[in-house]
């Protein structure tokens, strides 16, 4: 398929280019002391990812430890109730640790091993990435330093405990607003000093090249499996696919399998409390071009051009930008982006739980809410939604704020 001068048959080979650009988005925007460490990761990844030993080992780990392939479930009761398109979900909630994040964390851990590194370094906001990475570190016998703001440490006590139980060091970041942004800065700073023995592991398809490309490649297992499974189940491709977009890793992993197919693709961002700046984190829908955290993409800015404060009920989605590949695919018209608010996502959270016996993560509930709306607007056909994670982590919050809706 060729659309607006992009050939999707050869797309993955040509995007990003060798400097890490998807059109004008992506690249490496870093202080000097980080250029060498990051280009070392790039060189190593470009070589190692072609080695059949690496690929086969990752495959084996995914099967024997992580629980792949994850199934696709046909939501028969929900589809019948809606009366439009048939809805299917790709069950990334059934990964070990309960979400898609292990797809790239195990890849990053294995890469660290092949590079002879001893330690994984990362930041975490809500703690989900930290827990997934701590899991990978324990599996590979690596040290793990997770940088986390004091405010987040207080809010996310169970995840902090999980990381510690898994053997990671949680390093408290006490300056500034003491949240994710400061934790990113602290993790980068530590990495620039310790890169000889360590590797920085990003939590999504964001950051400087090669991270957006590398994390996409690791997450592409979602799309590859989904396409084959869906064809086998139904004999056809889905008419539409849907996924939630925070940094954009589960979505790009899913979408990458279908870019060259006649399939409508929808990315769903968090509209939070509404469209006013500060009330949401729908960076692609409302943002403008800019550089943050080492890459050029579309982002939400404040009056000084700095990353704007963002909000969503789903802590995995409240990031003021998205991966550069999303900005590119939006600009080229291949993917449509829309936003779903807190309340709609909570309704979908309960609907999926009641109708299908699957309690979704609040992040994933955004995709489910959008999928339900889309199904209503179609009177036939099929929709495949990426269910990025399970909702156990959200139960306490939901019960406290919304009850159990008996
Ligand atoms: C972290 C997380 C997300 C958001 O991350 P992406 O990189 O956009 O995929 C979505 N869903 C779940 C369950 C998560 O844990």
Image (spheres, rainbow, N blue to C red):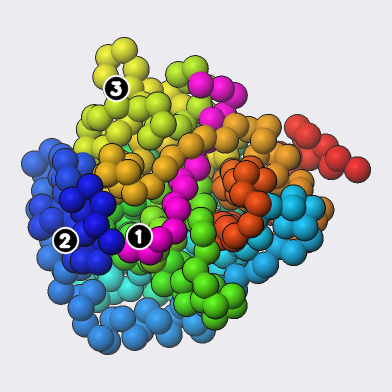
Q: In this view, does 70 lie above or below 212?
A: below
Which residues are drawn in magenta? Answer: 260-275
Q: Who's the residue at 43% across and 23% down the image?
A: 309
Label 1, label 2: how far apart the Cα atoms are: 13 Å
Task: Tell me residue 348's x, y (percent).
Answer: 70, 44
Whether 74 is drawn above or below 231: the answer is above
Front position among marks 1 and 2: 1
- Please give left or right for residue 291 compared with residue 126 in the image: left
SS for tag 1?
Answer: loop
Q: Quadrant of residue 385?
A: bottom right
Q: In this view, does 322 lie above or below 15?
A: above
Dot label at residue 211 = none
Q: Distance between the residues labelled 2 and 3?
A: 31 Å
Identity of the residue furthest to the front in this view: 379
Q: Earlier in the sequence, mark 2 or mark 3?
A: 2
Say what secondary structure mark 2 lies in: helix
Secondary structure state at the residue bearing disc 3: loop
Residue pointed to by mark 1: 259
- Visible residue check, residue 336: yes
Mark 2 highlights which residue?
A: 14
- Is the residue 259 above or below the residue 280 in the image? below
Q: Name the residue under label 3.
A: 306
Residue 265 shown in magenta: yes
Q: Quick check: is 175 in the magenta stretch?
A: no
Quadrant (top left/top right/bottom left/bottom right) for the C terminus: top right
State the separation of the CA atoms marked 3 and 1.
32 Å
Q: Which residue is drawn at 66% across and 60% down?
A: 86
Q: Nearer the viewer, residue 286 or 109?
A: 286
Labels 2, 3: front one = 2
What residue lies at 33% left-to-right and 31% top-to-bottom?
A: 299
Quadrant (top left/top right/bottom left/bottom right) for the N terminus? bottom left
């Amino acid at each position: 398929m060729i659309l607006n001068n992009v050939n999707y048959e050869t797309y993955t080979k040509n995007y990003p280019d060798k400097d890490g650009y998807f059109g004008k988005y992506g690249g490496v925007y870093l202080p000097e002391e980080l250029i060498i460490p990051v280009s070392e990761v790039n060189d190593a990844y470009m070589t190692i990812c072609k080695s059949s030993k690496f690929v086969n080992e990752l495959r084996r780990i995914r099967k024997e430890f992580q629980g792949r392939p994850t199934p696709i479930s046909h939501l028969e009761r929900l589809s019948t109730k809606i009366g439009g398109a048939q809805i299917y979900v790709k069950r990334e909630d059934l990964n070990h640790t309960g979400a898609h994040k292990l797809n790239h964390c195990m890849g990053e851990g294995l890469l660290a091993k092949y590079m002879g590194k001893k330690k994984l370094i990362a930041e975490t906001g809500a703690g989900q990435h930290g827990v997934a990475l701590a899991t990978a570190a324990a599996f590979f016998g690596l040290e793990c330093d997770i940088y986390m703001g004091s405010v987040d440490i207080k809010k996310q006590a169970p995840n902090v405990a999980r990381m510690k139980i898994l053997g990671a060091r949680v390093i408290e970041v006490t300056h500034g607003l003491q949240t994710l942004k400061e934790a990113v800065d602290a993790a980068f700073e530590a990495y620039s000093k310790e890169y000889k023995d360590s590797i920085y592991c990003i939590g999504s398809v964001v950051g400087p090249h090669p991270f957006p490309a590398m994390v996409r490649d690791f997450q592409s297992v979602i799309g590859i499996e989904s396409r084959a499974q869906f064809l086998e189940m139904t004999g056809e491709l889905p008419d539409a696919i849907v996924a939630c977009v925070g940094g954009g890793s589960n979505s790009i992993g899913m979408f990458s399998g279908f870019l060259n197919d006649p399939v409508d693709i929808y990315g769903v961002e968090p509209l939070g409390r509404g469209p006013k700046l500060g009330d949401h984190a729908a960076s692609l829908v409302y943002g403008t071009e800019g550089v943050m955290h080492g890459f050029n993409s579309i982002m939400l800015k404040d009056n000084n051009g700095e990353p704007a404060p963002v909000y969503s009920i789903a802590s995995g989605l409240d990031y003021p930008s998205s991966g550069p590949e999303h900005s590119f695919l939006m600009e080229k018209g291949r993917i449509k982006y829309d936003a779903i608010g807190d309340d709609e996502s909570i309704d979908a959270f309960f609907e999926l739980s009641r109708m299908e016996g699957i309690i979704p993560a609040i992040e994933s509930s955004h995709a489910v809410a959008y999928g339900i709306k889309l199904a209503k607007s179609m009177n036939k056909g099929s929709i495949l939604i990426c269910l990025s994670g399970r909702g156990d982590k959200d139960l306490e919050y939901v019960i406290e704020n919304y009850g159990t809706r008996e």
